[in-house]
Structures are given as structure tokens and as C-alpha cells.
Image (cartoon, rainbow, N blue to C red):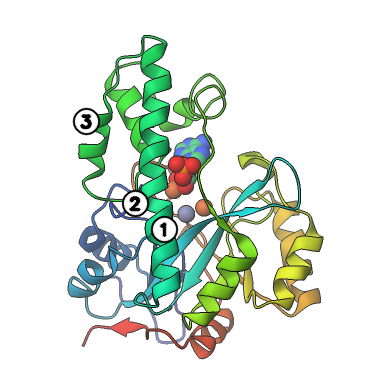
Amino acid sequence: MHPRPASAPPRIDLHAHSTASDGTLTPAELVRAAADAGLDVVAITDHDTTAGWEPARRALPPGLTLIRGAELSCRWHGEQPAVPLHLLAYLFDPAEPELAAELARVRAAREVRGERIVELLRADGVDVSWAEIHAAADGGTVGRPHIAAALIRAGLVATTAEAFGARWLGERYRLPKDDIDVFRAVELVRAAGGVPVFAHPRASRRGRIVPDGLIVELAAVGLAGLEADHEDHSPAERAHVRALAEHLGLLVTGSSDFHGSHKTVGLGAFTTDPGAYGRIVAQARGVSPVASG
Ligand code: AMP
Ligand code: FE
Ligand code: FE
Ligand code: ZN
């Protein structure tokens, strides 16, 4: 624990992954690492799953508040080919049937897609095994980082970043996911009492980005906020996101998007100001923040 002076603002990181998806710390290890990093609030936001919520809650160290969330794989069909994007969803009811069914469908489709990517690699003589990759994911949502880890184990690439290059999973062996339409996702998250925030909306270095016009439309149907401070945003992109959020009355967040050793960023590398955090909690109707006694 890192006690902080009473006058210091709380440190709030609203985007982190565990082994329930493509992070490398278990949910229990994640909350302990968050406390060790001096955070006061951490959100667990695994891709398309709430499986990490309970183990994170059970392991919650004193003084740390847990925000239960997820990062939904979405797609905008306003351009062809459709643009993939990520929607953070906080404090929604995980038992809401329509949203739960969509998440289950996306997870199942990720498995089919992962196996197809492995078939493409094997057809080119790359010796990776779906059974081994699937087993290594250990029931968590399967993603390209799990395949990247197999490429590293096989000695074919040195780093996850290299595995995401054009020669490998970034282009040549990249297949689309069966995602949720982003308008439907915003609607489903709100219907489940959750608070939707667009993850890294201007991260042009990750691929194609959506126009501001889409964000205007999403704000009109219930989008609550935009993630501005993120390692994949340049300073100019962060400033653009802040200005757009202010114009639309959306809240802004900052987060690490921690993935353990699958990425280099540390917990708390970017944080959210308490005012924006308070707005998220005030809008939530699904589940509550959890603080251990
Ligand atoms: P997928 O969800 O299977 O399409 O894989 C996307 C995930 O891969 C993202 O959530 C990131 O965790 C990770 N990722 C994407 N690009 C990179 C990169 N250049 N280096 C490391 N991890 C990446
Ligand atoms: Fe990820
Ligand atoms: Fe993301
Ligand atoms: Zn993420």
C-alpha cells in the first residue's frame, strides 16, 4: 500500500485487463497490483466478458475501490469496410439477458476466428497449435495477443508488438471479429444500467478511426464519455478528444489500458479526474462500485 497525503486527489484508472481476456495478471493479481501502484480506484474491463468480476471482488485489498466493467468489441457500419471500435461499459447489470447474450455471441465468434487465424498460419507452415493457444487462454476471451504469445513461444517473433506488425497478425493473418453494432451496444449498455464510454476514439496508430460525426450521433443516443488520455493518443489527439467532449457535454477519462506483460504500459500511467469518475458512478444503475472494508 502507498498511503497518500489526505490532500492528494484520488488516483483513478478506469481501463485494465486480466486473464479473463488478454491481460497477463489474474483478476486477483490485478487488484493487488492496482493497490501496489497506489491507485484508489481501478476498473476491470476485460474484452467482452464479466468473468473477472467475482475473483477481483473477492481479492479486493483494503482502500481500493473496484469498478466492474467490460470493453465491448463493436463495429460502425457507416463506412465500408465497417470500422472496428471499442466501447467501455461500466457498472452494468451482467445478468441483463440481451447484453449477456451479445457478449456470449462475440466470445464464441472470437474462438472461431482465432482457430481460423491459426489455420491460415499453419497453411503457410507456421507451427502453432490452436489447442495449445486455446488452453493457454484458460477460459478467458481469446484474442490476437494469445496467438502473438504462441508466435513468441515458437521463436518466430520477439515481442507482441512485432506479432502485431503487417507480416503477422496486423495484416497478413488478420481476420475481422463478429462484433456488436455500436449503436446497439450503447443502447444495450444503458438498458443494463451501465455507463458507456468510447475507448481510445482517436487512436489512429491502431488503425482506422471514426469521424467526429459518429461521436455526435452516439452522444445523442446515450454515450456518456470519451477516453482522452491513453497511450495510443498523441497529445494532439488527446486535445481533440477533450475539445469534442466539452462541445458535446461528455465526460472525459484517462486510463492505462493495462494488459500486464502483453503491453508495456503500467497501471496508473494515465488517470481519470474525480469529477468525471463521479459522473460515471452517478449515472450507473446496474451494479455499484465495490470497496472492501
Ligand atoms: P483482438 O481483440 O483479438 O482483435 O486483439 C486486439 C488486442 O490486441 C487489443 O485489445 C490489444 O490488447 C492488443 N494489441 C493490439 N495492437 C497491439 C500492439 N501493437 N501491441 C500489443 N498489443 C496489441
Ligand atoms: Fe486487449
Ligand atoms: Fe481497446
Ligand atoms: Zn483495453
Q: Position of residue 246 (x, y in %)?
A: 76, 75
Which of these two is toward me, 239 or 259? 259
The residue drawn where x is 35% and y is 23% is: 151
Per the image, the residue denoted by label 2 is: 21
Query: SS at mark 2?
Result: loop
Tell me: residue 182, above or below residue 209: below
Q: Is residue 111 left or right of residue 153?
A: right
Per the image, the residue denoted by label 1 is: 48
The residue drawn where x is 26% and y is 52% is: 25
Q: Quadrant of the N terminus?
A: bottom left
Tell me: residue 290, above or below residue 144: below
Tell me: residue 42, above or below residue 194: above
Q: Quadrant of the C terminus?
A: bottom left
Mark 2 crowd level (few <14, some 14–19, many ≥20, 10 Å Cα) = many
Mark 1 crowd level (few <14, some 14–19, many ≥20, 10 Å Cα) = many
Q: Position of residue 9 (x, y in %)?
A: 49, 80
Per the image, the residue denoted by label 3 is: 132
